[in-house]
Image (cartoon, rainbow, N blue to C red):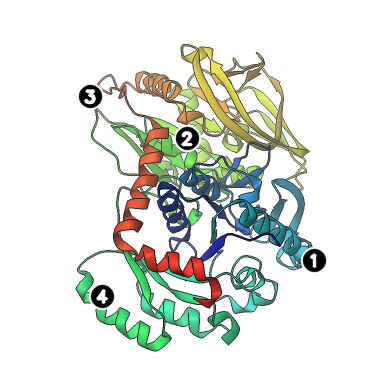
């Protein structure tokens, strides 16, 4: 019999409790110690995804966790992905490929097959790596869903994995959350819970200690660590709960020159790949803010319309809110607008759907001269090319979309490596299907110079040294440092080594 590597499941009291970042921190910490480690999330629900080397798609958090391990993203790390297109339906992605549209009730029909997929992928990873750090989904205390659970206690039970529960103290009531999560579980599930980690703590740890002592007395389980709140951690947030209207993206740093460049990123209801705008927020002097109403657009130097998992629904929302009219006014007055993927499609003349929705054809905003048709097969590709528009800048990114441009009268923004054209430029409006394009440092700098010039921000100066890739690596190292300094790593490693018998 092949010996399987150790494993740990990091569950959370709620969504956005800190599961993803703790897993990334643990993965980076172990990798720095020379341990062969991989991440795993059995089932994810997110519209923030990336394309893997093998041409599939997985949740953004698992791609970040893979980077923490020194690995390329793989469908092995997130075999089941749900991409919500409405309040009631989601696209089901299995091993990186879209296989069905499901509702809460019809998803149950796939559970047994998905359980087999999840078990096989996890066992394969445990054969290939010394340690697998698993991330739960939502909360394990959703006992109404326990019978069909794939990612929390269902996974832990099936694979005999010990569990640590993380809670976000910034939300308030974290001790009750931790205690209550254990209390509602069955005795069999409770036996797998080995302890807790508290996230985003501010203040004097001595004031918290009596509560931790009482929590241990009540549950007979230790708190392995209290991780402090850290303002420097903000990149690659996966959960849309963190994308709040009027909230800044990142931590804006002071300008290199004498002026700021203000970016308004439209917070669509079904927004996808929110991390596209984070590369702009990495730049000194660039202030990026999520917006949901039209009064925010006139004062912005640049407006970004991001991707969407429900393009026509979000286009209708733009019209209802008055944001569409504000965007059209920017186009008429020559002020910069950038559309990415679904946002790019909305800026065109017409969209023919029938895939994401049952609407056959609608008019776009008309800021670009292109027509889009949706097709059943999804484009999934990692791409490289250049931009003649910006001094032949080298550009890389990835594509995830059903819509195809079937006609365009615009100049291209990008060129694929094979010489074919992509994207659009029409006056002050640009668009592309490529996600991640703004992470290409030289392209981003030239793009910001263009936006600043059109906006009359002559005092804005682009930093010559910002590297998004380097900043991401620094954030991963910071996560590992926080784990090393604030978590009883030896105790956790003991749990991983001993497994459910710890």
Q: On the rendered image, what quadrant is the N terminus found in?
A: bottom right
Which is nearer the N-term, disc 2 or disc 3? 3
Please state if 308 lies on the left or on the right of 295 as rendered: right
Kindly state the secondary structure of the residue where label 1 is placed: helix
Label 2, label 3: how far apart the Cα atoms are: 23 Å
Q: Nearer the viewer, residue 31 or 56?
A: 31
Residue name at image x 47 percent, y 61 percent: 19
Q: Give residue 129's position: percent from left, percent from top.
A: 58, 52
- Residue 304 got which mark? 2
Which is nearer the N-term, disc 4 or disc 1? 1
Q: Nearer the viewer, mark 3 or mark 4?
A: 4
- Residue 109 got which mark? 1
Q: Give residue 313's position: percent from left, percent from top.
A: 64, 47
Q: Which residue is mark 4?
A: 208
Q: Nearer the viewer, mark 2 or mark 3?
A: 3
Q: Give residue 430's position: percent from left, percent from top.
A: 53, 24
Q: Nearer the viewer, mark 4 or mark 2?
A: 4
Position of 393 relative to 144 (above/below): above
Position of 49 relative to 372 (above/below): below
Residue name at image x 32 percent, y 52 percent: 481
Q: Nearer the viewer, mark 1 or mark 3?
A: 1
Q: Are marks 1 and 2 in contact (CB under 8 Å)?
A: no
Please state if 438 lies on the left or on the right of 126 as rendered: left
For the view shown, which residue lies furthest in the front direction?
1
Q: Nearer the viewer, residue 148 or 431?
A: 148
Which is nearer the N-term, disc 1 or disc 3? 1
Label 1, label 2: how far apart the Cα atoms are: 39 Å
Which is nearer the N-term, disc 4 or disc 2? 4
Residue 423 visible, this angle: yes
Q: Which residue is mark 3?
A: 257
Label 4, label 2: how far apart the Cα atoms are: 42 Å
Residue name at image x 58 percent, y 80 percent: 189
């Amino acid at each position: 019999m092949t010996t399987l590597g150790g494993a740990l499941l990091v569950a959370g009291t709620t969504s956005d409790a800190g599961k993803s970042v703790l897993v990334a921190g643990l993965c980076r910490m172990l990798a720095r110690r020379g341990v062969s480690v991989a991440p795993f999330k059995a089932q994810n629900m997110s519209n923030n995804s990336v394309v893997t080397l093998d041409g599939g798609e997985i949740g953004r958090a698992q791609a970040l966790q893979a980077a923490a391990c020194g690995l390329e993203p793989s469908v092995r790390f997130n075999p089941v992905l749900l991409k919500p297109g409405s309040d009631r339906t989601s696209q089901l992605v299995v091993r990186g490929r879209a296989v069905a549209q499901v509702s809460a009730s019809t998803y149950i029909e796939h559970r047994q097959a998905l359980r087999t997929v999840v078990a096989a992928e996890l066992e394969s990873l445990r054969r290939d790596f010394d340690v697998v750090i698993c991330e739960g989904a939502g909360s394990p205390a959703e006992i109404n869903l326990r019978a069909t659970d794939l990612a929390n206690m269902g996974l832990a039970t099936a694979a005999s994995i010990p569990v640590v529960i993380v809670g976000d103290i910034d939300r308030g009531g974290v001790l009750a959350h931790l205690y209550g999560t254990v209390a509602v579980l069955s005795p069999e599930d409770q036996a797998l819970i080995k302890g807790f980690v508290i996230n985003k703590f501010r203040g004097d740890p001595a004031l918290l200690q009596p509560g931790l002592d009482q929590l241990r007395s009540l549950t007979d389980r230790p708190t392995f660590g209290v991780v402090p709140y850290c303002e420097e951690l903000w990149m690659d947030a996966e959960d849309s709960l963190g994308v709040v209207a009027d909230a800044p993206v990142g931590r804006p740093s002071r300008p290199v020159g004498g002026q700021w460049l203000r970016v308004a990123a439209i917070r669509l209801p079904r927004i996808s790949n929110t991390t596209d705008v984070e590369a702009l927020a990495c730049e000194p002097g660039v202030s990026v803010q999520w917006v949901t109403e039209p009064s925010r657009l006139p004062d912005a130097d640049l407006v970004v319309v991001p991707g969407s998992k429900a393009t026509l629904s979000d286009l209708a929302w733009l019209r209802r809110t008055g944001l569409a009219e504000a965007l059209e006014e920017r186009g008429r007055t020559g002020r910069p607008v950038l559309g990415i993927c679904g946002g790019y499609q909305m800026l065109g003349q017409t969209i023919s759907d029938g895939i994401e929705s049952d609407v056959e054809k609608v008019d776009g905003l008309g800021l670009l001269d292109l027509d889009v048709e949706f097709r059943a097969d999804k484009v999934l590709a990692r791409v490289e090319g250049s931009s003649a528009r910006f001094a032949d800048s080298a550009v890389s990114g990835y594509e995830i979309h059903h819509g195809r441009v079937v006609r365009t009268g615009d100049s291209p923004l990008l060129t694929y490596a094979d010489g074919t054209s992509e994207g659009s430029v029409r006056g002050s409006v640009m668009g592309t299907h490529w996600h991640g394009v703004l992470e290409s440092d030289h392209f981003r700098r030239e793009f910001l110079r263009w936006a600043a010039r059109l906006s009359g921000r002559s005092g804005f100066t682009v930093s010559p040294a910002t590297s998004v890739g380097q900043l991401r690596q620094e954030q991963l190292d910071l996560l590992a440092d926080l784990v090393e300094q604030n978590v009883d790593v030896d105790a956790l490693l003991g749990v991983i080594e001993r497994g459910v018998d710890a």
